[in-house]
C-alpha cells in the first residue's frame, strides 16, 4: 500500500509524514519501521520493501524519504542522479502499491506530472501546499536545521537534546538533518563547501546504516554526530 505525502510546503509535508509514522507505530507496536533515503534506493532495496515480511513481523512500515531531487548538483559529484533514482523507484511503483506493507513516499515539491502518476497508485494522497500566510509547522525544527547550516556543534547538540525531550523520534530528526544536508548540496551555504556538504550527507547515511546493523543507538549516534560536525572537513584533507 502506498501513501503519498507531497506539496510545496516542505515543512508541513515532512511534519505530517512523520506524524503519520508515529501514529502508525503507536497503533501497531510490532510494525517494523525502516526509512530509506534517496541514496539507498536500489532494485534490491525496493524489492525487499515490497516483499519483506516474516514469521515475527507480518508487515513493514517503510518511509521513502525525498526520492526525487529538485535540482541537479554538479555532474562531477552526482551525475545522472535524478534519472537513476527516478527510474528505479518508478520501475517498482506497481509492486509497492500492491504490497501488504505500508509504504510512504515523502516527496516535497513533487512536480505535477509525477505527482499525478504516483497519486493514481496511492491508497491515500496527502498534499500540503504553502498558503499565503501560515504559522510555523510544529515538527519542522528550524532551530535544528539552522544550527547544522551554521555548523555550530554546541547549538546542534542542544537542539537535538531539546527535540528528544519534546518527544521527537530520532528517525524524524535524522530525516530532517539529512534533508538539510542535501539542501546545502544543491543551494550551498556559508559554512559548508560543496565537497563538505556532500560528505555531510554521506556521513548521515553511514550513521543510519551503522545504527541499523546494531551499532550505536540512533539517538546516541545523533548526539555524537552533532559534536563532530566540525570534523567533517578533516576527512577531506
Image (cartoon, rainbow, N blue to C red):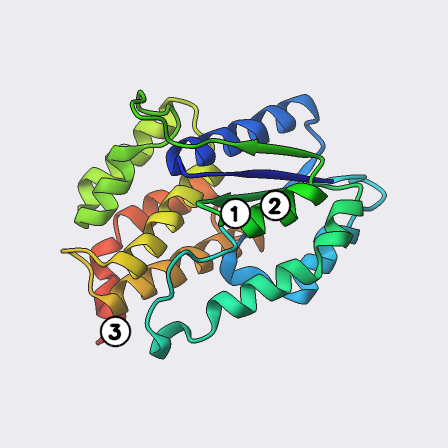
Camera sees residue 61: no
Image quadrant assignment for residue 144: top left
Q: Residues within 10 Å of mark 2 (few under 14, many from 20)?
A: few
**Label for residue 145?**
none
Image quadrant assignment for residue 233: bottom left
**Label for residue 236?**
3
Q: Residue furthest right?
A: 55
Q: Quickly name the residue at label 2.
A: 116
**Number of numbered labels in the structure image:** 3
Residue at point 34%, 79% (across, down): 76
Q: Nearer the viewer, mark 3 or mark 2?
A: 2
Q: Nearer the viewer, mark 3 or mark 1?
A: 1
* Residues at marks 3 and 1, CA–CA distance in whole angstroms: 39 Å
Q: Residue 6: give x, y in percent of width and height.
A: 51, 39
Q: Residue furthest bottom?
A: 76
Would residue 133 appear left or right of 90 to someone viewing this image? left
Compare marks 3 and 2 and give the one earlier in the sequence.
2
Q: Residues within 10 Å of mark 1 (few under 14, many from 20)?
A: few
* Residues at marks 3 and 2, CA–CA distance in whole angstroms: 42 Å
- Asked if the residue at tag 2 contacts the one at tag 1, i.e. Cβ–Cβ closer than 8 Å, the answer is yes
Secondary element at image label 2:
helix
Q: Residue furthest left?
A: 190
Q: Residue 149: give x, y in percent of width and height.
A: 22, 48
Relative to 24, does residue 192 appear above or below in the rendering?
A: below
Pick the front one: 58 or 80: 80
Q: Give the quadrant of the C terminus.
A: bottom left
Relative to 78, does residue 131 appear above or below in the rendering?
A: above
Q: Quickly name the residue at label 1.
A: 112
Amino acid at each position: 500500500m502506498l501513501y503519498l505525502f507531497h506539496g510545496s510546503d516542505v515543512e508541513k509535508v515532512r511534519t505530517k509524514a512523520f506524524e503519520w509514522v508515529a501514529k502508525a507505530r503507536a497503533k501497531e507496536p510490532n510494525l517494523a519501521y525502516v526509512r530509506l533515503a534517496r541514496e539507498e534506493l536500489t532494485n534490491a532495496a525496493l524489492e525487499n520493501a515490497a516483499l519483506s515480511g516474516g514469521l515475527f513481523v507480518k508487515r513493514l512500515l517503510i518511509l521513502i524519504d525525498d526520492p526525487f531531487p529538485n535540482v541537479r548538483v554538479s555532474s562531477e559529484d552526482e551525475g545522472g542522479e535524478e534519472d537513476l533514482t527516478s527510474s528505479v523507484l518508478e520501475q517498482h511503483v506497481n509492486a509497492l502499491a500492491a504490497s501488504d506493507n505500508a509504504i510512504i513516499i515523502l516527496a516535497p515539491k513533487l512536480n505535477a506530472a509525477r505527482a499525478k502518476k504516483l497519486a493514481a497508485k496511492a491508497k491515500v494522497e496527502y498534499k500540503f501546499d504553502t498558503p499565503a500566510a501560515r504559522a510555523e509547522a510544529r515538527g519542522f525544527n528550524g532551530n535544528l536545521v539552522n544550527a547544522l547550516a551554521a555548523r555550530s556543534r554546541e547549538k546542534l547538540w542542544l537542539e537535538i537534546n531539546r527535540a528528544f525531550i519534546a518527544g521527537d523520534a530520532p528517525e524524524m530528526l535524522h530525516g530532517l538533518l539529512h534533508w538539510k544536508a542535501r539542501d546545502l548540496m544543491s543551494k550551498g551555504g556559508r559554512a559548508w563547501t560543496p565537497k563538505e556538504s556532500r560528505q555531510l550527507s554521506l556521513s548521515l547515511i553511514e550513521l543510519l546504516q551503522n545504527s541499523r546493523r546494531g551499532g550505536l543507538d540512533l539517538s546516541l549516534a545523533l548526539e555524537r554526530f552533532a559534536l563532530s560536525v566540525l570534523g567533517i572537513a578533516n576527512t577531506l584533507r
